[in-house]
Amino acid sequence: MNETTTGEESPASDLQSGRLSDFAYSSIKEQLTRGAYKPGHKLPIRSVAEMLNVGATPAREAINRLVFEGALVMVGPKTVIVPHLDLAALYEVTQMRLALEGLATEKGALRATNDVVDKLLALQEKITFSLDEKRYSDALHDNKEFHFTIYRLCEMPHLLSTIEALWLRVGASFHDLYPEFAEAKYGVHNHLAAIEGLVDKDPSAVRAAMENDIRDGYRRLKKAAQERLRRQ
Amino acid sequence: MNETTTGEESPASDLQSGRLSDFAYSSIKEQLTRGAYKPGHKLPIRSVAEMLNVGATPAREAINRLVFEGALVMVGPKTVIVPHLDLAALYEVTQMRLALEGLATEKGALRATNDVVDKLLALQEKITFSLDEKRYSDALHDNKEFHFTIYRLCEMPHLLSTIEALWLRVGASFHDLYPEFAEAKYGVHNHLAAIEGLVDKDPSAVRAAMENDIRDGYRRLKKAAQERLRRQ
DNA sequence: TTCATAATTTTGTTATAACAAAAATCATGA
DNA sequence: TCATGATTTTTGTTATAACAAAATTATGAA
């Protein structure tokens, strides 16, 4: 049962945090944000434990944590699944994102140095480049980095972790329709407007740009979700 | 080891949720919001487990969950304590509260029925009564109920649970100075203004009243915390 | 087939023991 | 008195087994 395994994920490869629970948590989260599991996919403790080569305790802890955070949902006393598309939740999370990411943006905007602006410009270039080549996963990754580079400026750790939980919540169940969602050059205009606001030292302009970005994303995501629901 | 215990909390008394982890979680949370533990108080797994007459697993899970939520903090690889006063965290949480509770208020305001208004009026009477008799714990409890009665109107469960986490976060480490903070008739004016706004079907008025309430509370709490810090 | 029910398997939860590492205590020397 | 190092105790984590309950499959009758 404890033989050194070959292909599968191994806890030994987690060289940073000693806790197997954290390893399991990060692993599942990673899979989730990569869209590895379809909505409705079941995550039984023992299967997860076996997949990650850990005991039941860390697996259980990781799953439960993700349930608390809303990235997974319980549909029965003994069944945890990857959540299905839920337009109500998408709306709710979007409203929270507007409030919280708007707050983070406005509080941090005046702290943007030239280095930050350069980083954002570089990220935006990478995003458009990835979109041109239809590497949506990369584009999404850099898009997230773009947002959080701005949010980190306010230096409010509580706020940041709450925002991250929101991204995970919506990202988990909407990830698989990001490709069709990202077709058009998503967010370019808003991102550039945000950068401009940072340069101009105009916090409310940056906030407006970011809020616009969130709203645009919401509309596209909603449309994509609705179309998919109609087809099914 | 398993004899029927006398005075202490017993898992058998938890007649609703079958999970001992949840029982342990609620119990610690309850103690925390009642200010039973001073900041700096250690919460070792085995002590908690013994106190609640449960095994180490549920105790560990409950403690870790509270750490994730920010209600408890880790100050070493093996030491979890009730957090100390932290003015930066108070500020940060206040900003988040303004954004999120403001959102909940505005979204739900138009849904207030006469029953809700009556309930709020009754709660406000209880609050002032409790304050007159210096039963601060009761006043705080009803104050929370007042706020959440309004927040529940918007029917956004994600939002509500996030707000609850914020209350717990700040409540845990500031609870013991609420008495001196509540000296003056705290919040009466704002609460009445909020009720008025609900009756008038004026969401932004209700939001303004609630934000004022949050800000007033922040100022008083900050002042009380600063005075206490100076004394120590 | 369809639905209810019984049998079987799977599954979440929990207590426990073992281990390694951290924290506390004690001893010793300046 | 204070620091410092050694020793002892405490502590978090994890794998595991056992149990009860849920989920699944099989079975039977209409």
Image (tube, coloured by chain):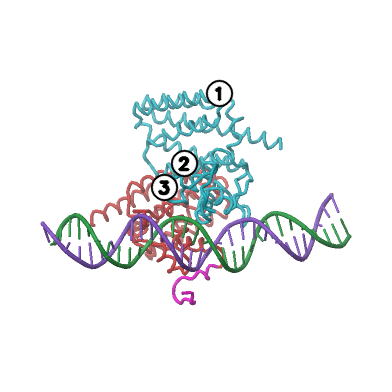
Chain colours: A red, B cyan, C green, D purple
Does residue B114 appear left or right of residue B82 in this picture? left
Residue A211 visible, this angle: yes
> What residue is shown with label 3?
B17
Q: Residue furthest front?
A: B3
Residue drawn at the location 51% of the way across and 23% of the way down: B129
Which residue is at the front of the view, B11 or B26? B11
Secondary structure at badge 2 equals helix
Question: Residue B91 is drawn in which quadrant?
Answer: top right
Amino acid type at image mark 1: Glu
Mark 3 or mark 1, which has the lower sequence index?
A: 3
Q: Is residue B11 above or below residue A38?
A: above
Within 10 Å of disc 2 (Cα), the crowding (few <14, some 14-19, many 20+) is many
Residue numbers of the magenta segment:
A1-14
Q: Are marks 2 and 1 on the same chain?
A: yes
The residue indicated by pointer 1 is: B133
Instruction: Name the residue: 67% across, 35% down.
Output: B228
